[in-house]
Amino acid sequence: MTLNLSEECTNEFEFDCKEVAFQVMNAVLDSENCPYEATVDLTLTTDSEIHEINLQQRGIDRATDVLSFPMTQFPVPGEFDFLEEEGMDSFDPDSGELMLGDIVISVDHVNAQAAEYGHSQLREFAFLVAHSMYHLIGYDHMTEPEAKIMEQKQKDILNLLHINRD
């Protein structure tokens, strides 16, 4: 797993965000039996910057906690078999790694939501990474059944890593 981290703002986290993101990402890929080495770009930014990205990319005029930009469209969430025949463009020609996509997280939202929900910054950050990783491999939460599946998967990953609500 390759994690390219870009910090476009100062964060005051009391944990190593790259290490936590790496652990969460690997746990998600292992839980989904991903047969490939993968690469993800993670950007930590401010509310104002994520607001601008959200407006430009999605036409939504507000800040949000996390944005996910998948490189590959998965016909079936978490199913990697199709990549053997159809997904050659999904692999980095130099490293051979599966390019999953980009994650953008607002540090401002991590802090605010941790306080609002009464848990640690670590738990909120790990949750947002897990949430976004599931988006990168095709999961969504647009319908109630999809949301239940995704919520359970996120919960299972955080429990596996012992990153629970305080």
Image (cartoon, rainbow, N blue to C red):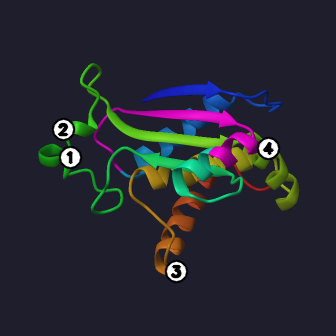
Say which label, 2 or 1, has the lower sequence index: 1
Q: Is residue 6 above or below residue 49?
A: above
For marks 4 and 1, give the one nearer the viewer.
4
Near mark 1 (Cα within 10 A), the count class, few <14, some 14-19 or many ≥20, is some
Q: CA distance from mark 2 to mark 1?
A: 7 Å
Q: Is residue 106 visible?
A: yes
Q: Amino acid at mark 4?
A: Asp
Q: Which residues are magenta?
A: 33-52
Residue drawn at (31%, 30%), measured in percent from left and top?
97
Q: Amino acid at mark 1?
A: Leu
If the image is split into quadrants, where does the N terminus sit?
top left
Q: CA distance from mark 4 to mark 2?
A: 37 Å
Q: Is residue 162 visible?
A: no
Question: At which x and y percent is residue 124?
Answer: 73, 50
Q: Which mark is residue 108?
A: 4
Mark 1 sits on what residue? Answer: 83
